Amino acid sequence: MLKESTEVLVIGAGPSGCVAASYLHNNGVKVKVVERSKFPRFVIGESLIPRVMDHFEEAGLLDALIAKDFEKKFGARFIRGEELCVFDFSIKFGDGWDWTWQVPRADFDNTLAEEVVRKGIDLEFETEVLDVVFNGTDSVTTVRNKEGVTREIHAKFIIDSSGYGRVLPRILKLDAPSSIPENSSMFTHVKDIKRPVGVEGTQITFDILETKVWLWVIPFSNGNTSIGVVGPTSYINAIGGANNTEALKKIIAQSDFYRDRFEGVDFLFEPHKIENYSCSVTQLYGPGYTLTGNSSEFLDPVFSSGVCFATESGMLSAKLFLKERNGEKVDWETEYSDYMRRGVNVFATYVKEWYTGNLQTLFFHQPENPDVKQKICSVLAGYVWDEENPFVKKHDRVIKSMAYMLQNEKSAE
C-alpha cells in the first residue's frame, strides 16, 4: 500500500481545519489536510459571531475573507409578535470585535480552502478516511481518493475537524448523547426580490413563532437570503405538506413580520431537513489527537455558536500541538478539554434557557436594563471564556434567577 507521512493530519477543510492548518503552516509545521467533499459544497451555519474574527486574523486568513465582501453582521435582532430586541455588538461588556459576517457557507469555506492551498498547504479534496490506528508514537490513517486509490498517511498528530462527518468519534466510538433537547431544522435559500433597502434588508433576524419554535432570516451580500425554521422534532415533523417546500412555506406564512416579504418567492432548492442535530462526545482528545468543532459537539443554531467553537478548538489544538512540539509540557485535560467545555457549557445554558423561555423574558423585558444587555451581548458575540462577565461566570444560575424575579414583578403588577 502507498504510504506518506506528515507531522499533523487535519481531517476536514471547513473553518476549523483551515484555521488549524494555516496556523501550523505559518509556524513551520508540515501539515496535510484531507477533505471528503469537493468544494464548493453546501453546508449550514451561515451566521458567524465576532469571536471567530480573532481566529481568522491570527491564522492569517482574514484578508482573503475581507476581499470577498460578505455581508457584515453588526448584531442580531429578535422579534416576538409586537416585541423587539436588538443587540449591537459594539455595545457589549469587555473588548472584542464589533462585527462579523453573514455568509453563504459554500463560498465562505471555499475561500478559506483556496487561501490554505495558496499558502502551499497540501489539501486533498474528495478523499475519505476509512480507518485510523494509533500505535503510541504516531498514527496510521487509511484514506481513499476519488480514483479509488487507497493509501496510508502516517502522522504524529491528528486534528479531527470533520464536522458532521465525525470521523474519529465514529471510528473510536466516542459518541455521547447531548444535553440539549431534541430539535430539528428545515431551511432553504431564496432570491430576496422584495428585500427592503438599508439596514432592514441586511439585518439577521430571529422571529419567535412560539416559545420553542423560531424562524431565521439571514440576508447575504449576493442578493440571496437563507430562511429556516427550528423547533422540537415532533413539531417539525407534524407541519404537514406534500414535501419540505410546502411545509416551510406553511411556517413562513405564520410570521406576521416576514409573510409578505417572502410570499410568492421561489426557493432556490428543496428545503433541507436535519433532525435531532445536537450531539456530543465522551472525550475531546486522546493520545495523538483532538476533536474540534462539530466533530466534538454541536448545540443549536439559535446563537450561531457552531463556527465559533470550530475555530476556537481548531486554533487551540494547533497551539497546544506546537507547544508540545517545542518541548513544553501540555496538560491536555486542563488546557484543552476543560477550557473548551467551559465555553460550551456557557452557551449550552443559554440555549437551554432560550427554550424554557427564561432568556426570552430577559430579552424582551421593558424597560431594558443596559448593563444586563451589554453582558448578554458579550456572550452572544462569543466571548464565553471571559469570567469577568458575571453572565459567563454565573451562567448556570443568573438567567434563571433574573427571569424568575422579572416574572414575579410582572405578576405583582
Image: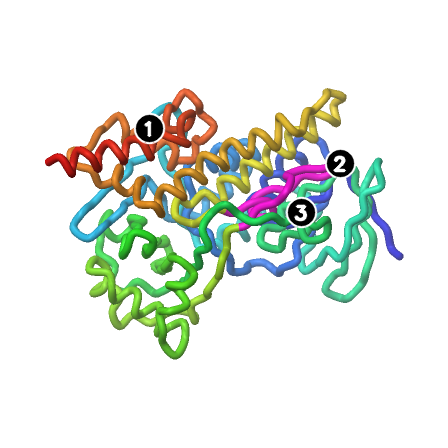
| Side (left or right) of 38 relative to 127 | left
The foreground one among 183 and 18 is 183
Q: Which residue is drawn at 20% across and 60% down?
A: 256
Determine whether the residue tagged by mark 1 lies in a helix, strand or loop. helix
The residue indicated by pointer 1 is: 375
Q: Does the magenta stretch include residue 405?
A: no
Q: Quadrant of the C terminus?
A: top left
- The disc labelled 2 sits on which kind of residue? Pro
Q: Can residue 113 be seen in this view?
A: no
- The disc labelled 3 sits on which kind of residue? Leu
Q: How many neighbours does mark 3 have within 10 angstroms: few (below 14), some (14-19), or many (20 or more)?
A: some
Q: In this view, does 382 lie above or below 111?
A: above
- The disc labelled 1 sits on which kind of residue? Lys
How far is disc 3 from disc 2 in space, using C-alphas? 14 Å
The foreground one among 355 and 274 is 355
How far is disc 1 from disc 2 in space, using C-alphas? 38 Å
Which of the 4 image quarters holds residue 25? top right
Determine whether the residue tagged by mark 2 lies in a helix, strand or loop. loop
The disc at residue 174 is 3
| Side (left or right) of 131 relative to 207 | right
Q: Position of residue 383 (x, y in %)?
A: 43, 31
Q: Which residue is drawn at 38% across and 24% down?
A: 389
Q: How many neighbours does mark 2 have within 10 angstroms: few (below 14), some (14-19), or many (20 or more)?
A: some
Please provide the residue range marked out in magenta. 279-298
Q: Position of residue 108 (x, y in %)?
A: 49, 50
